[in-house]
Amino acid sequence: MNPLAQELNHVLEQKAPSVYRSLSTMGKDLFFPKGILAQSQEAKAKGHKFNATLGIATEEGHPMYLPSIQKFIPDLDPKDVYSYAPAAGKPELRKAWHEKMFLDNPSLKGRTISQPIVTCGITHGLSLIGDLFLDPGDSVILPDKFWGNYKLIYTTRYQSGILTYPLFSNEGHFDLEGFKDHLSRTGKKQKKLVILMNFPNNPTGYTPLPHEAEGIRDILVEQAKKGNDIILVTDDAYFNLFFKDSIKESLFAYTTGLHENILTVKLDGATKEDYVWGFRVGFITFGLGDESQADAVYPALEKKVLGAIRSKLSNAPHLSQTLVLKALESPNYQQERQNKYETLKKRALKVMGVSQREKYQSAWSVYPFNSGYFMCLQLKKVNAEKARQHLLNQYGVGIISVDDTDVRIAFSCVEENQVEELFDIIYQGIMDLS
Ligand SMILES: Cc1ncc(COP(=O)(O)O)c(C=O)c1O
């Protein structure tokens, strides 16, 4: 093993033994080399005559560029566009996102969390979790309704298993009992518990109510006290789109700084929150259970993440980081974000009213939803995939079939005044088949 990796492992073993125990084989091996990047940093600071270290081409003191590209972004300084961003991301962006997390999550006040590291979208953050914590044969604990890509990431790429607990109780709320029971049973069989929570949830659009979030927190602490090493990952892709009675903060804010056996990892990003899906700007942030060790542990974890990034993507795109930073710094940012929120909220409330109408009750029941981009219907009479195909072929209406009974509807891309027609057509399609 590289001596730099050994050094990091030593820090983690001493200062955060639970985190050290949870690392995968790759997680233990990872380190950030001191090679070209470190030498370039030194040259940047001291190489005042010539700096012949950079892996880019320069002229007249700035990165070379093609005018046919620059003409579309005339207001941006070429140095903020064309050169590589650091492996951890633009420092100003990391700082701005850190501040934003505290602004958006008042419960974080007083907590010591790591600096966010820029990822290439949240999907990349999800795979960093695999790099750091999952060996073949390990498992990820999820509710029984989850984003399909988790399966590809964790079972196919990382050769880990997926274990599920019921998301909803019979009363249509987060199934605290089911979650507790699942953790307790699984915790007896394996010491490490990698738990992934995604709220607002894809596909259902559910986010726990405040007392449910507190219940989740208490269950995690109880399990940690039993001796399990817990990695709690929050996938906050649809953060901020809370439309009703749910918590309005990330579950990360409820669960960090709780117990030395719980490491909380927040995955979030501008991709969905700031409506820049193709920009691929995400973040990974750590929250230690024992914050007194933050000064030693966060840099060690950061170096492991940087090793994972450097060895796979090298770094995330600079142009989109610059644009997201500009947005965060804009005095109009909050208002613009609020405007989009209001538009999506109106659609969500409309869908809540329309989808539950009496006339549809023979065709489907509606899963609870209060947030996000999506909602799900459980079809009573017809197979979900058959319904999907029929709706597409006969009516030109596209929805997603999630399994045999459930379909997912993305109200994020249906205008408010189209909602009634959409549900009428879905109903008609189901009636045709039943
Ligand atoms: C739950 C969830 N997480 C992550 C992602 C992907 O986010 P990103 O585009 O930032 O990779 C999606 C996208 O559909 C998602 O639904």
Image (cartoon, rainbow, N blue to C red):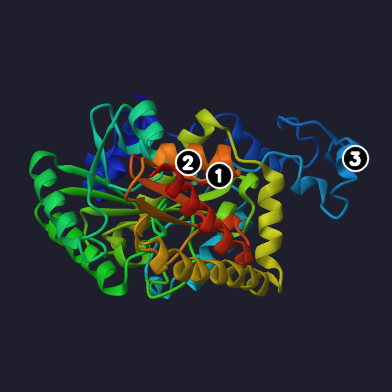
Q: Is residue 302 visible?
A: yes
Residue behind mark 1: 398
C-alpha span from label 1 to label 2:
7 Å
**Where does residue 382 sit, x and y in percent of width and height?**
36, 43
Amino acid type, residue under disc 2 in the picture: Arg
In front of the other: 367 or 303? 367
**Where does residue 388 sit, x and y in percent of width and height?**
47, 41
Mark seen at residue 224: none
Circle 3 or circle 2, nearest the eye: 2
Which type of secondary structure does the marked residue at label 1 adopt? Answer: loop
On the rendered image, what quadrant is the N terminus found in?
Answer: top left
Pointer 2 local density, CA inside 10 Å: few below 14, some 14–19, many at least 20: many
In front of the other: 129 or 84? 129
Amino acid type, residue under disc 1 in the picture: Gly
Task: Quadrant for residue 259, please give it.
Answer: bottom left
**CB within 8 Å, label 1 to label 2:** yes
Of the two numbered discs 3 and 2 on the same chain, state the one appearing first in sequence: 3
C-alpha span from label 3 to label 1:
53 Å
In front of the other: 275 or 317? 275
Residue behind mark 3: 60
Pointer 1 local density, CA inside 10 Å: few below 14, some 14–19, many at least 20: some
**Where does residue 97 sit, x and y in percent of width and height?**
55, 61
Q: Is mark 2 within 8 Å of ligand 1?
A: no
Residue plotted at (31% across, 57% down): 288
On the rendered image, what quadrant is the C terminus found in?
Answer: top left
Of the two numbered discs 3 and 1 on the same chain, state the one appearing first in sequence: 3
Circle 3 or circle 1, nearest the eye: 1
Residue behind mark 2: 388
Which type of secondary structure does the marked residue at label 3 adopt? Answer: loop
**CB within 8 Å, label 3 to label 2:** no
